[in-house]
Amino acid sequence: MGNLIKVLTRDLDSSGCNFFLDFENAQPSDMERATWEKVKLVLAEGQLVLEELQMYRGAGEEIRQAIQRPTVERLQQRAWAAVVPIVSKLHTYYEFSQKLDSCLCYLLEELACSEAPPTQQLEQKQALAQQFAHILHFTLRFDELKMTTPAIQNDFSYYRRTISRMKINKLSGESSNEVNNELANRMSLFYASATPMLKTLSDAITKFVSDVSPLPVSLMRYTTKHLNDESTPKQVKNMLLPN
């Protein structure tokens, strides 16, 4: 991930140029407004995701009792009833990561659509550059909460084991769940990452840089200044900063 920062900032490092981004007062132009409004909606949804994640309550106790007494059907049902709505929320976050991926793609396309020098593009489109910084901030915050909430992995692991058992035993519950076995497998790849949103962001940016244009996003410097905050987990710092 540190290499991504090198790629994104290489143009600025070689040119040695400096410029000012007024993130506090940036307003979209008429040409930017359509993209800005789309991204604004996604960012608002992202704020709700963070608020929910901050209040995450796992099903640890219910799961523990169900595992300790596997023959007591009442405890199995209680654990299942506790974990299903939790996994529904995790599904929502997973779907939001895909929405964020799409949002980032059209935001970067708008930022890079001009043939003007990159620094000039960013100066001319400061409202969109500001939104890109907000996306990065959301990413860091989501992954910080995910890393400090081990119950997420525990709850989801129990859910996957249970629906796998349902499938093997040909029980009806597996097929009627919002998150079936196939979807759970895809979600597992997402939550297996220590920083799932950062990986989503990294993959999207890397693909954009490779397929469309080398985008030296100088506003990364605005965002990465927050990497020095004490509240930023060491794992995130290690992944973002160049070696």
Image (cartoon, rainbow, N blue to C red):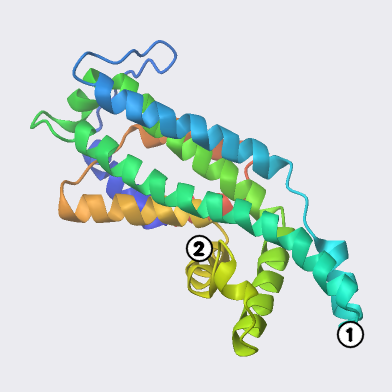
In the rendered view, tell whether residue 148 sits above or below residue 169. Answer: above
Local packing at callout 2 (Cα closer than 10 Å; few below 14, some 14-19, many 20+) is some
Quadrant in which the N terminus appears: bottom left
Labels 2, 1: front one: 1
Q: Amino acid at mark 1?
A: Thr
Report the disc number at residue 71: 1
Q: Residue at x 54, y 50 (%)?
A: 92
Quadrant in which the C terminus appears: bottom left
**Residue 242 visible in image:** no
In the rendered view, tell whether residue 16 sits above or below residue 4. Answer: above
- Rendered image quadrant of residue 220: top left
Report the disc number at residue 231: none
Q: Amino acid at mark 2?
A: Phe
Report the disc number at residue 190: 2
Q: Residue at x 29, y 16 (%)?
A: 28
Q: Position of residue 41 (x, y in %)?
A: 42, 29
Q: Position of residue 140 (x, y in %)?
A: 54, 43
Q: Position of residue 8 (x, y in %)?
A: 29, 45
Please tell me whether mark 1 sits on a helix, a strand or a loop. loop
**Residue 148 visible in image:** yes
Contact flag, marks 2 and 1 (Cβ < 8 Å): no
The Cα–Cα distance between marks 2 and 1, rounded to whole angstroms, is: 32 Å
| Nearer the observer, 186 or 130 | 186
Q: Residue at x 61, y 89 (%)?
A: 168
